[in-house]
Image (tube, grey):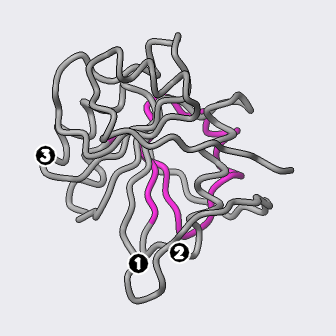
Amino acid sequence: MVICQKVQMEANVSATLPDSSDRLSVLLATNHLFSWTGSETLFITLIEGLRGHVTKLTIYVRHPDKAWAMPLVGPDICIVDNLDEIRSIEFDLAHVQHSSCLVDIRLAFPSLPIIFSSLGILPFLEQPAPFEIGITHFLAISEEVSANLVARGIAENRIEIVIVRIIF
């Protein structure tokens, strides 16, 4: 299923983004998009922050709620729940939330650089894969999450702590 539709949403996001000559084709991936919980809020904020700063932005979501997700994407952004629909696209980078998507993305795109965001210490979805699958870099939303990643065998020099402040 491919979902594409216009969105009107404001987000205050501070980030260093590429200038127009260095824009990237980015694949975002998450396990679910079906309500305003923490991971969806962060994910939608990330989309809004990247909008207009990347050449192509595509979203892979394993479990979308079409009625909830459609108003949150624009005509230039597609949501897919089947990676076969986008295998032919050459992405520069994948940003993945939730471990359930890590293996999916790696199998579909064997050499794609992947950034994994860990949003907590308890849910199994927030844990890195229990085996090496070539994650380029890890993002942790707090010092506690960073320590959890280190305890799971991720080297500290591969982890960046990114404190996210979402302002509505």
Picture layout, residue 77 above or below residue 114: below
Counting residues from the start of the chain, the first of labels 1 and 3 encountered is: 1
Please indicate, yes or no, whether residue 23 appears anywhere in the rendered image.
Answer: yes
Q: Which residues are magenta?
A: 57-82
Q: Is residue 69 left or right of residue 102?
A: right
Circle 2: element type: loop
Mark 3: amino acid: Pro
At 48% across and 84% down in the image, what residue appears? 19
Q: Which mark is residue 53?
A: 2
Q: Which mark is residue 119?
A: none
Whole-percent x, y for residue 158 in the image: 31, 40
Mark 1: amino acid: Arg
At 46% across and 22% down in the image, what residue appears? 126
Q: Is residue 106 left or right of residue 102?
A: left
Q: To which residue does mark 3 refer?
A: 110
In this orientation, which residue lies closer to the viewer: 44 or 141? 141
Circle 3: element type: loop
What crowding class fits label 1: few (fewer than 14 Cα within 10 Å), some (14-19), or many (20 or more)? some
